Image (cartoon, coloured by chain):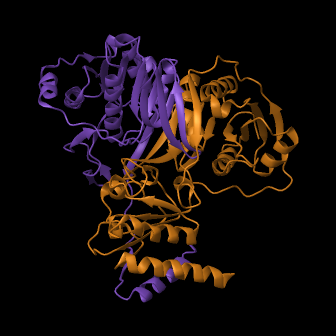
């Protein structure tokens, strides 16, 4: 382990004091890169609440060699500009090789950090590898609505990389590993931002999980015939612990809110399992979900484009088949206990 | 109120073609980036709400063909367009583009009130340029905005994040990155089309913006790209017997450890 080739992961904590899921996902490729590059892994923890002891153990076990505690004084939520400036200052001062950022809030401020730190930024990588010869990280990402894959490298370090959600597994715990902890207090006391959050209303989405983070997504389209039948989608999603999505057609028709739309002008999801109910598969929809690991489609029209993409398709009546599937899932979960 | 909206012309990604695994860029129909259409409509609405001396400039970067997309923006309601075009911009990364756009704003509209971007471009899908330009111009930015209303000289902004529906207030110059809104881009009327046809759209080179190869140097570079491999042929079964079909699907999901 050397002081060069330091890999940074910027992480924050979820409300209950655990490491955010996205940060855990970033730790896996970060540890691999650190090992391959004969370097080390440093976690920059944006926090107000964690003591040194917790950080040593919590992050040590997750693979970190070092933890830099960056007290945010509540700014993480309220003043993203101040956090971006603090991270840019830290990156410019210590010059890590690569900085991995995951999770919606960090991805949001990543371009600002890159601009302030004069660093390169690669967005939404889903694979990272170390190139020994060129001593550089090669990132793979997709563009053109997931149709084209590309490999991108940074020209100089530090290089910032944001990670595609769900692309990397959580790290295996290393029992007994303890990280060195240092507190860095570089959050500049700035004037109150001219941009202030004034209110926040929790979403009323059905489906326990948020679309982008869910392992399973159940989506419905026009084939459900009327808005009331969307309850079949919700019931199946409930039985699977899945999030609910929708096609553009039903969002534009006012059946479902826009925050459920999957596709070109909606959300891009890549769950382990995507179930499309009564969705024919317009390209605008497919680009939002074609990176899903497994796609199941149920549709009346055997020529529907969705079947070209599906791992498993059923040509049939979605209104008849869906409730049977829901019952079968509930039954199989019960019999497993 | 001085408003700037940034427009990108992108290939219609429902009509992409590949040859030997490589994207064919020639001859693919182009269009205004869909999120930029929402940005443009949002900007036009802000201009209407502000009334008086308000002014809406639209800026794009690309080849001469991009003028057509800028004209579409003028026809819909922008007052004037500016095109940034230079070999030094080609082959750059998001940092290159953001540097050029920020320089154009400094030159043309230094006293701007609000910069409006689309959340992301369809082609490179990086969602970098808006916040990067905002940082270069030292103003705050908000992403995923789906509504912007002018109220007592301040902007009330709505956005959706994993935390919920958020409302923000912007008091002073700033940038918005707009995603799908409740409204679509209006169609242009005859008057708008005539204005667009007559519009003289200046083209700025890197030198016009006092930019050189050093400052425009990209910070990341493409190694290679290739078409996403087609999935192996899936299984499609007949669902006339719904019970039997569900049983088969459940077996499949169990075998794949998906439930």
Residue placed most toward the observer, B47 or A274: B47
Residue A206 in view here = yes
Residue B226 locus on image (x, y percent): 37, 51
Q: Residue at x 54, y 51 (%)?
A: A127
Q: Quadrant of the N terminus of chain B?
A: top left
Residue placed most toward the observer, A164 or B90: A164
Residue A138 locus on image (x, y percent): 53, 44
Q: Quadrant of residue A228?
A: bottom left
Q: Residue at x 44, y 76 (%)?
A: A322
- Colour given to chain B in the rendered image: purple
Q: Quadrant of residue A208?
A: bottom right
Q: Quadrant of residue A76?
A: top right
Residue B89 in view here = no
Residue placed most toward the observer, A14 or A306: A14
- Colour given to chain A in the rendered image: orange
Residue A143 locus on image (x, y percent): 40, 46
Residue placed most toward the observer, B94 or A211: A211
Position above or below: B35 against A320: above
Q: Quadrant of the C terminus of chain B?
A: bottom right
Residue A125 locus on image (x, y percent): 52, 46
């Amino acid at each position: 382990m050397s002081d060069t080739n330091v890999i940074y992961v910027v992480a924050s904590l979820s409300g209950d004091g655990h490491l955010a899921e996205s940060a855990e996902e970033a730790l896996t490729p970060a540890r691999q890169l650190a090992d391959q590059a004969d370097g080390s892994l440093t976690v920059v923890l944006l926090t107000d609440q964690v003591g040194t002891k917790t950080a040593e153990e919590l992050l040590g076990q997750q693979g970190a060699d070092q933890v830099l505690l960056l007290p945010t004084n509540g700014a993480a939520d309220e003043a993203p500009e101040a956090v971006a400036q603090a991270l840019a200052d830290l990156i410019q001062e210590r010059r890590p090789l690569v900085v991995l950022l995951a999770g919606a809030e960090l991805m949001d401020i990543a371009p600002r950090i890159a601009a302030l730190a004069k660093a390169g930024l690669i967005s939404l990588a889903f694979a990272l590898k170390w190139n020994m010869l060129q001593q550089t990280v090669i990132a793979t990402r997709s563009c053109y609505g997931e149709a084209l894959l590309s490999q991108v490298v940074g020209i100089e370090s530090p290089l910032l990389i944001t990670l595609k959600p769900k692309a990397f597994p959580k790290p295996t715990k290393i029992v007994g590993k303890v990280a060195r902890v240092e507190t860095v207090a570089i959050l500049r006391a700035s004037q109150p931002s001219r941009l202030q959050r004034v209110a926040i209303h929790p979403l009323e989405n059905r489906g326990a999980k948020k679309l982008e983070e869910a392992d399973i997504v159940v989506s419905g389209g026009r084939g459900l015939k009327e808005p009331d039948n969307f309850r079949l989608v919700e019931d199946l999603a409930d039985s699977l612990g899945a999030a609910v999505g929708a096609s553009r057609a039903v969002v534009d028709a006012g059946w479902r809110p826009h925050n459920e739309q999957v596709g070109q002008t909606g959300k891009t999801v890549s769950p382990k399992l995507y179930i499309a109910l009564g969705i024919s598969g317009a390209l605008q929809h497919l680009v939002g979900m074609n990176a899903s690991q497994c796609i199941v489609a149920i549709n009346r029209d055997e020529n529907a484009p969705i079947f070209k993409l599906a791992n498993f398709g059923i040509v049939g009546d979605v209104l008849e088949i869906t409730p049977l599937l829901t019952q079968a899932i509930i039954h199989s979960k019960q019999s497993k206990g | 109120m001085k408003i700037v909206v940034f427009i990108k012309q992108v290939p219609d990604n429902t009509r992409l073609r590949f040859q030997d695994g490589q994207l064919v860029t020639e001859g693919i129909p182009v269009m205004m980036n869909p999120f930029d259409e929402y940005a443009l409509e949002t900007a036009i609405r802000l201009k209407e709400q502000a009334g008086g001396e308000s002014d809406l400039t639209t800026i794009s970067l690309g080849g001469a063909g991009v003028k057509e997309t800028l004209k579409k923006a003028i026809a819909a309601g922008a007052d004037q367009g500016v095109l940034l075009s230079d070999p030094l911009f080609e082959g750059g990364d998001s940092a290159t583009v953001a540097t050029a756009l920020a320089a154009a704003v400094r030159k043309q509209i230094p006293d701007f009130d609000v910069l409006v971007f689309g959340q992301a471009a369809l082609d490179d899908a990086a969602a970098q340029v808006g916040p990067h330009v905002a940082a270069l111009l030292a103003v705050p930015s908000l992403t995923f905005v789906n509504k912007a209303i002018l109220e007592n000289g301040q902007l009330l902004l709505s956005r959706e994040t994993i935390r919920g529906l958020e409302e923000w207030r912007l008091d002073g110059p700033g940038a918005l990155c707009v995603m799908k809104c409740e409204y679509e881009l209006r169609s242009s009327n005859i008057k708008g089309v005539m204005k667009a046809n007559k519009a003289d759209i200046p083209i700025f080179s890197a030198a016009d913006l006092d930019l050189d190869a050093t400052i425009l140097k990209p910070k990341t570079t493409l190694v290679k790209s290739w078409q996403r491999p087609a999935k192996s042929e899936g299984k499609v079964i007949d669902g006339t017997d719904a019970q039997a079909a569900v049983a088969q699907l459940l077996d499949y999901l169990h075998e794949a450890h998906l439930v």
